[in-house]
Image (cartoon, helix red, strand yellow):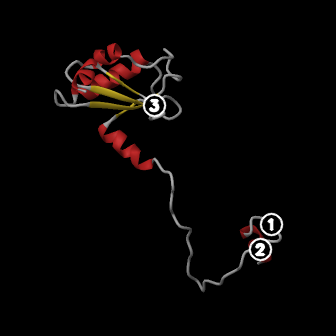
């Protein structure tokens, strides 16, 4: 219909789309997402510690949330293997600061611990990670 063609033309009366009879077949848009992060979530869930704050995650404090979560992952990880945290946000935690090496040392001294800021432009590391770098 003309109404559908106008909708396809983004409501521009001079840009009316062409109606094509597909004879019962379906046409789908190209499912291309030029900037997607959804594959990352599986990697985070399986191999990393999700350090995101609400509404994305549940971390609200370096002391009360980050350290116990990293320590729990370290307890499940072979000694000496890296514990990797992602998504921490200094602006959304109670302490309003970045985790320090001293904070991260409290989670484990037997594992290098490296955490990535939500901006993906900053990292913090514990003493062992810094020693090994």
* Numbered circle sitting on residue 16: 2
Residue drawn at x 33%, y 35% is: 48
Q: CA distance from mark 1 to mark 2?
A: 7 Å
Q: Residues within 10 Å of mark 2 (few under 14, many from 20)?
A: some
Residue at disc 1, secondary structure: loop
* Numbered circle sitting on residue 52: 3
The image shows residue 12, relative to residue 68, as above or below, that is: below
Mark 1–mark 3 CB contact (< 8 Å): no
Q: CA distance from mark 2 to mark 3?
A: 45 Å
Residue drawn at x 30%, y 20% is: 126
Of all residues shown, which one is farthest toward the left? 79
Question: What residue did someone put label 1 on?
Answer: 12
Mark 2–mark 3 CB contact (< 8 Å): no
**Residue 114 coordinates in the image, percent (x, y):** 32, 28
| Residue 45 lies in quadrant | top left
- Looking at the image, which is closer to me, 17 or 128? 128
Single out the mark in the foreground, 2 or 3. Answer: 2
Residue drawn at x 70%, y 80% is: 19
| Of the image marks 1 and 3, the number of the one nearer the N terminus | 1
- Looking at the image, which is closer to me, 116 or 106? 116
Residue drawn at x 49%, y 22% is: 90
**Residue 85 coordinates in the image, percent (x, y):** 35, 31
Mark 1–mark 2 CB contact (< 8 Å): yes
Residue at disc 3, secondary structure: loop
| Residue 80 lies in quadrant | top left
Q: CA distance from mark 1 to mark 3?
A: 42 Å
| Residue 68 lies in quadrant | top left
């Amino acid at each position: 219909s003309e109404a559908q063609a106008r909708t396809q033309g983004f409501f521009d009366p001079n840009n009316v789309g062409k109606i094509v009879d597909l004879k019962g077949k379906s046409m789908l848009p190209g499912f291309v997402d030029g900037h997607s992060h959804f594959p990352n979530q599986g990697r985070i869930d399986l191999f990393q510690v999700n350090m995101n704050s609400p509404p994305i995650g549940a971390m609200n404090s370096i002391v009360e949330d980050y350290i116990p979560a990293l320590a729990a992952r370290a307890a499940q990880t072979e000694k000496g293997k890296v514990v990797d945290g992602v998504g921490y946000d200094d602006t959304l935690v109670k302490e309003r600061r970045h985790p320090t090496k001293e904070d991260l040392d409290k989670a484990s001294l037997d594992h290098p611990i490296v955490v990535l800021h939500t901006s993906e432009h900053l990292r913090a590391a514990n003493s062992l990670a810094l020693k090994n770098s």
